[in-house]
Amino acid sequence: MSSFSPGELGRRVGNGLLSFPVTHFAADLSFDEDAYRDNIARLGTYEVGGLFAAGGTGEFFSLTPAEVEQVVAAAVRSAPEGTPILAPAGYGTRTACELALAAERVGADGILLFPPYLTEASQEGLAAHVEAVCRATSLGVIVYGRANGVYAAETLARIAETCPNLVGYKDGIGDIDAITRIHTRLGDRLTYVGGLPTAEMFALPYLELGVTTYSSAVFNFLPELALAFYGAVREHRR
């Protein structure tokens, strides 16, 4: 069972650096759970807002649903108490719902919802997809806008009205006008997460748009540097 209500998760995620630990594989491409758990325990010793288990750079798209559940369970067991673990959900709507249920079953604290499996999607379809996943779980859900999952401000506002456990929006698109419209429309109803590659390059201007945190690749290799940079961004130090 999650240690965080959806509201608590949103606040915690929005006030700390995030990262997506790599997923360790053995030579035969099976999941190397021991190495992964050691790394999660190491990264969890740092003060972070949350860790994405099997995220986009954590090989979500290279894992079967059963392997995703195994990775998430390993992260939950290895992270220090109080470190939020967010699990992935994605692909078709029914699969995404099953992944969300599995994440809740093994004790994850929240869901990062990837774009659905389509080359394109209407706003109505995207809304129905997110609403179905939110209904399937009691965990807080952060929707990931990127690729074919391009959410209009009006769409996110509609979902936020019907789904109280929608707690965040992660932007992997980089459309400044769009993120401005989203933040203007929803204000502090959501937590806003930067999800562009090398997020540090965009952290300061995004902060001015209400994006208080981001997922850092640097944290995987140089956690002290990543945290120092994040602290400087939040304090507007140059």
Image: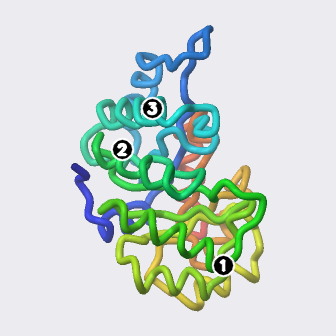
Which picture quadrant has residue 218? top right
**Of residues 36 and 97, the one drawn nearer to the viewer in this rendering:** 97
Return the disc, 3 or 1, that comes first in the chain's sequence. Answer: 3
Residue at the spot x=54%, y=67% of the render? Answer: 129
In the depicted structure, whether residue 41 falls above or below residue 125: above
Residue 123 - label: 1
In the rendered image, which quarter contains the C terminus? bottom right
In the depicted structure, whether residue 21 falls above or below residue 27: below
Res. 103 in view: yes
Which picture quadrant has residue 7? bottom left
Q: CA distance from mark 2 to mark 1?
A: 27 Å
Looking at the rendered structure, the secondary structure element under dot 1 is: helix
Looking at the rendered structure, the secondary structure element under dot 3 is: helix
Residue at the spot x=77%, y=58% of the render? Answer: 119
Return the disc, 2 or 1, that comes first in the chain's sequence. Answer: 2
Furthest residue toward bottom: 185
The residue tagged 2 is 102
Res. 233 in view: no
Q: Is residue 162 left or right of residue 219?
A: left
Furthest residue toward top: 27
Q: What kind of residue is marked 3?
A: Ala
Residue 208 - label: none
Q: What kind of residue is marked 1?
A: Gln
Residue 66 - label: 3
Q: Is residue 16 left or right of residue 93?
A: left
Q: What kind of residue is marked 2?
A: Ala
Expressed as whole percent of the image width and height from the top left, the position of residue 202 reads 72, 63
Q: CA distance from mark 3 to mark 1?
A: 30 Å
Looking at the rendered structure, the secondary structure element under dot 2 is: helix
Residue at the spot x=45%, y=45% of the render? Answer: 51
